[in-house]
Amino acid sequence: MENHAPRTLKFNPSGFQASVPADAAARADQYASAMMDDGELRYLASIALAFPWSPEALVVEIGSYSGLTAAFVAETLAGAGHANPVLSIDPFERVPHTRKNPQGKYKRYLRTMQERGMEDRCLPLIAYSEHAAPVVPDRIGLLIVDGNHEYESVTRDLALFAPKVLPSGFIFLDDHTDTYPGVVRATGEFVNGSSDFELLHQTYFAILQRSTGDP
Ligand SMILES: C[S@@+](CC[C@H](N)C(=O)[O-])C[C@H]1O[C@@H](n2cnc3c(N)ncnc32)[C@H](O)[C@@H]1O
């Protein structure tokens, strides 16, 4: 018999807890890729579903590659009755490909959205994040930072986009590992220098949450 019970994830070091319904966990298995594994996608689903979505809020993903994670989040939100859009910021083929910083694939992105029926939910913005920032509204419920992984870029992405995150909104940073010291350093400095964001979880990815804004 199938188990439909939600699974509770515990976040370390914060002790925050969030649940992943069985359908989202099954979807995480289906969407797992070399870019985000099923464990990351489960945590991503849990925070996407923990945010109190209002119709004007949006998901922003910096660095979308072939769009699998964007489609996963859009489908997970749709499954919970939320029609909020996912803005995918990526210059795709304009990015010089290196081993640590792969180049996005725009045709594959379009194919992913077509195959998953997410073309009207996941909206590509073909630009470097620093150029896209001025046109991105300050109504972000979930920000995924997964573009250029160098220290200067991650620092700039956090400086430009974190202020656009709504109260109690989340930031998910991928590749928080020794292989990407710039991600680890930029995340640590941001958390230490911010009175507004709490580090909820850190492992090979990191999750931050903005305070509620209540006194
Ligand atoms: C690791 S991949 C993203 C994987 C994707 N988040 C996923 O889970 O499938 C990194 C992406 O960042 C993009 N990128 C590189 N520099 C960028 C920048 N400055 N702004 C936005 N995207 C960037 C690349 O084109 C590439 O598609």
Image (cartoon, grey):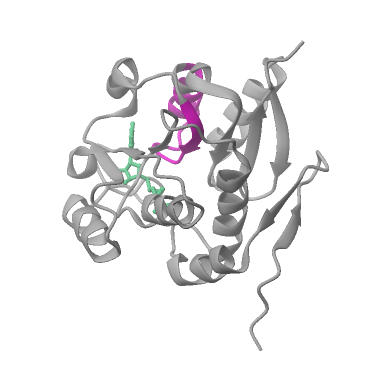
Residue 167 drawn at (x, y percent): 61, 22
Q: Is residue 200 at least partly visible in the picture?
A: yes
Q: Residue at x 55, y 45 (%)?
A: 48
Quadrant holding the N terminus:
bottom right
Report if residue 139 lies within the magenta region. Answer: no
What residue is at 54 percent from the left and 57 percent from the top?
A: 41
Horizontal and vertical percent position of residue 98: 32, 47
Q: Judge by depth and name the residue closer to the eye, 93 or 112.
A: 112
Instruction: Residue lying at the far top in this picture: please name it.
Output: 215
| Location of residue 47 in the rendering, given as x and y in whole percent from the top left corner | 61, 45
Image height check: is 158 above or below 178? above
- In this orientation, which residue lies closer to the viewer: 167 or 108? 167
In the image shown, does 74 or 42 lie closer to the viewer?
74
Residue positioned 43% across, 18% down in the render:
138
Work out whether residue 176 can be spotted. Answer: no
Residue located 63% across and 62% down the image = 21
Q: Give the quadrant of the C terminus.
A: top right
Specify start and end residues of the magenta stretch as a single range. 140-159
Q: Quadrant of ligand 1?
A: top left
Kindly indicate the quadrant of the structure image that contains residue 199: top right
Q: Is residue 125 above or below residue 36?
A: above
Q: Is residue 71 left or right of residue 181?
A: left
Q: Is residue 198 above or below residue 106?
A: above
